[in-house]
Amino acid sequence: MLDILKQIYYWLDVRLGTHGLINEQRTGYLLPRNINVWYSLGSVLLVIFTLQVITGLLLMLYYVPDADEAFASVSFIMNEIPLGRLVRLFHAVGSSMMITVLLLHMLSVLFMGSYKSPREIHWLTGFILFLLSMGISLTGYLLPWNQLSYWATTIATDCANSVPVIGSYLVELLRGGKQVGYQTLGRFYTLHVGLLPLIITILIGSHLFLVKRTGVSTPPFGLEDTSNKWKSDACVHEEHPDGIPFFPNFLLQDLISISLYLACFMGLVFFMPNLFIPSTSYLPANPLVTPAHIKPEWFFLANYQTLKLFPSEIIGLTVQAVAISFLALLPFIDRGSEKHPLKRPQFTFFAVAGILLWISLTAWGHYS
Amino acid sequence: MKMHTGLALLLTLIVLFPQLAGAAGQPVTACIQCHSTLPEKFSSPVKLWQTSIHAEHSIGCNACHGGDPMDPAQSMNPARGFRGVPDSLTTPTLCGGCHMGIAKHYMNSAHGRALGNGGPTCVSCHGSHDIKRASLALISKKYCSSCHTFEKARLIRSAMSRRDTMLMAIEKKIKLLKIQGVETDPLEKRLFALRNRFHAMFHSLDIKLIIMESDHIQAELEKNNGAGGAGTGPLTGVMAIGWALVAALLFYLIKKNVE
């Protein structure tokens, strides 16, 4: 058996140079020696995305994307299919956890200044990935066709109405009709299982390629930085001659973080599954009965509350568009080279204020 | 003519601005609109009805009094089925038109056999406009001792209260399972049917069947308690978390060793 494996390895090595490739990754891929645990969140996100794909594919085996059948099929998965409840909870809780870990990943990048030159494109691809993750969660939210998802989608798509001139056309484009109905379900399903996962996979690949190509950024604190710096006159792979090897050192750190994440995730799935799934999620959609309190998913609550704060939706949407554009283009606005959060107090002040504002709006949206 | 025009205008306004109507779910009819504006003697039934189980389920005045509730001009026309105040002798038959099982039990009971000889009709206990939901609270000294002593009624009440509490507990449990995504439709339907039968049994006072039926549904509920939850029990959860933490510890120790 071992001989066969060795022969396959040799066969591949002759053709692809796998031995050299693996050796290069084992010994040649050095990371900053002051690298910290926050850098492992990217790997955690990869695991989460993979789990979402696997559980999503399993759910697709029994889910019926038809307005008359969708709710019953989800109920069937949860009640009749062996381990169906577990798979569905993995997928539903996993989507919220994906956003949570993404937010933590982005915050660590912000505070450690890793978005700065020459990593503007890294930030941009990451930011688009964040927006797409919210999009894939929004489209997936409708699929169980329950009261909450139906009405939350009605309100979410209705926001497009406030766009001048083309608002009503946009709403119809999103819904596939005047109302949220079976056409909307078809559109959201296509986006959720086809287009969005494809774009996300391509962007994850691009993001990883960029990180590998430029080299991992050095944290602004901890041990002294020994990397060869980018001088902005030529493309330089940032190397860390005195750094630590990715394999096995940082891979083990990745595995520790992934295991700890899985422990938290299992805790939520097994003991607090309804933290992210309100009870109205278990009532079938009824277009004739509007529930008393319709709320979007927790990560849209700040947006939802912002819309309510302004006298007209178009102002609320414009404010949010400006804020999102500012964040997306941050590396092109913040051109300073200092990365330590305490040595750039203005940035840290506004970043903390922004986070507190977001938390307050989210809490306000939840309790309003 | 003026009054009819006014009523028509009022109904039109209510259709256009539904918030002008009464409590959510209650039907807004010509009867209610007109009687609400009349002196106390004629408007008090509306207020009483609004607190009733009938109002809760959108059962309007015409269900008992007949007539056409959507046509203000003809609402009290006998040609449209208006029958006015039902005669007490025909009340059980009238109510039994909808509550068929209950009417049958009532007719076979001591209460039913005394109909026309001072025996109580449906409205004696349930009220005529503020119609009350059938519950153990109706078997009370207030109602029963107005005709006979409460002693026998007390025995019946205590015998039935255990099952009533159980039905409420089952309902609570079903609600809890429902908000966890467990398929509860068959259980809800069975509980609904059982509760109806139980309430009907009030009138015959035969509780043996109810005890047997509620035992069956309780057993089924226990069986369904873990429905669809295979693999999501607390023990599996503890094991999954445990394995993840052990893996984290193992990787940490290897990492320390490597460093």
Image (cartoon, coloured by chain):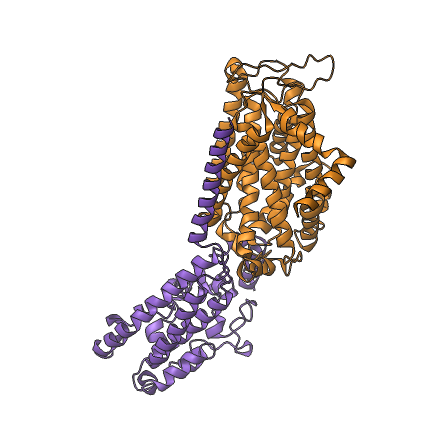
Residue B201, picture quadrant? bottom left
Using the rendered image of the protein, determine whether residue B60 is visible from the camera's viewpoint. no
Give the image location of residue B205, x and y in percent.
Answer: 32, 80
Q: Compared to A103, does A297 lie above or below? A: below
Residue at image point 60% right, 47% down: A141
Tell which residue pokes out farthest to the right in this image.
Answer: A15
Residue at image point 60% right, 60% down: A73
Give the image location of residue A142, x and y in percent.
Answer: 61, 50
Nearest the camera: B100 or B257? B257
With A361 as the anchor, is B129 left or right in this view? Answer: left
Give the image location of residue B13, x and y in percent.
Answer: 57, 55
Q: Compared to A334, does B123 lie above or below? A: below
With A365 as the anchor, is B148 left or right in this view? Answer: left
Q: How many marks?
A: 0
Residue at image point 53% right, 68% down: B69
Nearest the camera: A256 or A140? A256
Using the rendered image of the protein, determine whether residue A349 is visible from the camera's viewpoint. yes
Q: Compared to B74, does A4 lie above or below? A: above
Identify by letter the chain in purple: B
Q: Compared to B195, does A292 lie above or below? A: above
Give the image location of residue A306, x and y in percent.
Answer: 55, 34
Nearest the camera: A259 or A45? A259
Nearest the camera: A218 or B255? B255
Identify by letter the chain in orange: A
